[in-house]
Image (tube, helix red, strand yellow):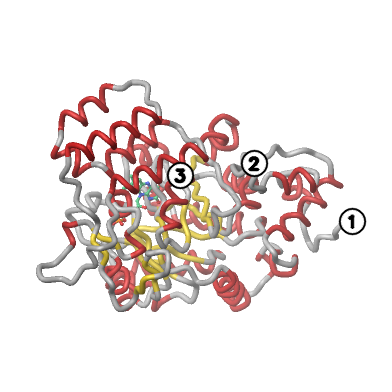
Amino acid sequence: MKFKLPNLPLSSLKTLPLKPKSQMASLLTAAEPQTRIPHPSEDLDDVLCSAQQLAEQQQLDLAETAPLRSLSGESRIERAWAHWTKLGRPKLIVAPMVDNSELPFRMLCRKYGADAAYTPMLHSRIFTETEKYRNQEFTTCKEDRPLFVQFCANDPEVLLEAAKRVEPYCDYVDINLGCPQRIARRGNYGAFLMDKLPLVKSLVENLVANLYVPVSCKIRIFPNLDDTIQYARMLEDAGCSLLAVHGRTRDEKDQKKVRANWDAIKAVKNSVKIPVIANGNIRHLDDAHDCLKYTGADGVLSAESLLENPALFAGFRTAEWVEEGEECNKDRKLDQADLLVEYLKLCEQYPVPWRMIRAHVHKMLGDWFRMHPHVREDFNAQHILTFEFLYNMVDRLRELGKGTPLHLKDTNGASIAANGLAVSAV
Ligand SMILES: Cc1cc2nc3c(=O)[nH]c(=O)nc-3n(C[C@H](O)[C@H](O)[C@H](O)COP(=O)(O)O)c2cc1C
């Protein structure tokens, strides 16, 4: 049955991913758990059908998913909250991380308490041009929701084309407005767009006018609070449905040395009406509770600390964050090597490039490697990795001993579920 779409420009329809309904469904079954995004086609009948599938798949009706362009400011805000609520108001969220927040890592974090996750930043131009890049850098599966797919961009039409390809598989298309690295300066994206706000506005507006899924932005703060607030309001007015605020400026690149500014995040939260996510200084679950309370934000992101400890959102913490005399539940033994083994199994299920696996091995086994540097040297010397080598390496480290279990603190926000995991009640 065909489905009539209200006010949908043909130009946007043509870029919708197209698959006959039966194939589209099979993309999301357990038999083929990992989704590779399909190619666009030009057939309008198929297009209309696939728009319906998109709506069905996301269990939304088209009235709710139609692009936002015709709505007034207040209706947009209502829609932003309705969507957020439909997703269960996720609070504990895996931050976007190039080469690090890929599917198996997201799935591991979800198992240990993450309510939602971002993909790594994808380069919108390369994404539209290169099939290999798309297939390698963006994979997902049915259980990988709620999901933010993040792009960097500086061309509204290119960004839209990239976004159209992923919108059936995600809950937000996110724009990276915070990357402070030299590569972003050279490529004219990320935090360097803070000098080109009219361009930022057009990136957001064009997506909002043509996508079914809401648009979110991840920003850094300006040195001046008023500028930050104006920036956040501009994004909201442009149709952004959710704002993640990293409480550091573009020049504050070393997140271990510079504490994030929660006051600035709080000020943004108080200045806009859309959901706001706080980012910075979330090293364990207590930080998440404190940040939510202090800033009034609707959720938190964690990045670096999650890489070392993907069970952070379930209440586990590394020894570094255990305070003297703190009551910890030491019976529930889980260590970083256990988490790495779980991650490797997920990588066997959902293949990813070895460079990503390598990065996670270094992060999760960092403490063990410091104690047994010769094991790290052997690992680094392996130009071609295999799962067998990695499982054996974990066994070897265990035999060498001294792995420290993660500590599980039963905070007032987390309770222990029957499966032994902490269930967050933030
Ligand atoms: C390895 C790594 C990769 C990152 N890649 C991205 C990215 O792709 N997009 C993005 O918006 N931020 C990226 N970031 C920044 C984080 O999302 C986050 O804003 C920052 O690390 C601050 O959070 P934290 O204090 O919890 O680490 C990355 C951070 C790390 C450590």
What residue is disc 3 on? 102
Q: Return the mark for residue 1.
A: 1
**Mark 3: few, some, or many residues within 10 Å (few <14, many ≥20)?**
many
Task: Provide the secondary structure element on which disc 2 rests.
Answer: loop
Q: CA distance from mark 3 to mark 2?
A: 18 Å
**Tally of marks:** 3
Task: Provide the secondary structure element on which disc 1 rests.
Answer: loop
Tell me the quarter of the picture where residue 132 sits.
top right
Tell me the quarter of the picture where residue 277 sits.
bottom left
Which amino acid type is marked by label 1? Met
If the image is split into quadrants, where does the N terminus sit?
Answer: bottom right
Which amino acid type is marked by label 3? Glu
If the image is split into quadrants, where does the C terminus sit?
Answer: bottom left
Nearer the N terminus, badge 3 or badge 2?
2
- Residue at (60% x, 52% y) in the render: 142
Nearer the N terminus, badge 1 or badge 2?
1
- Residue at (80% x, 63% y) in the render: 6
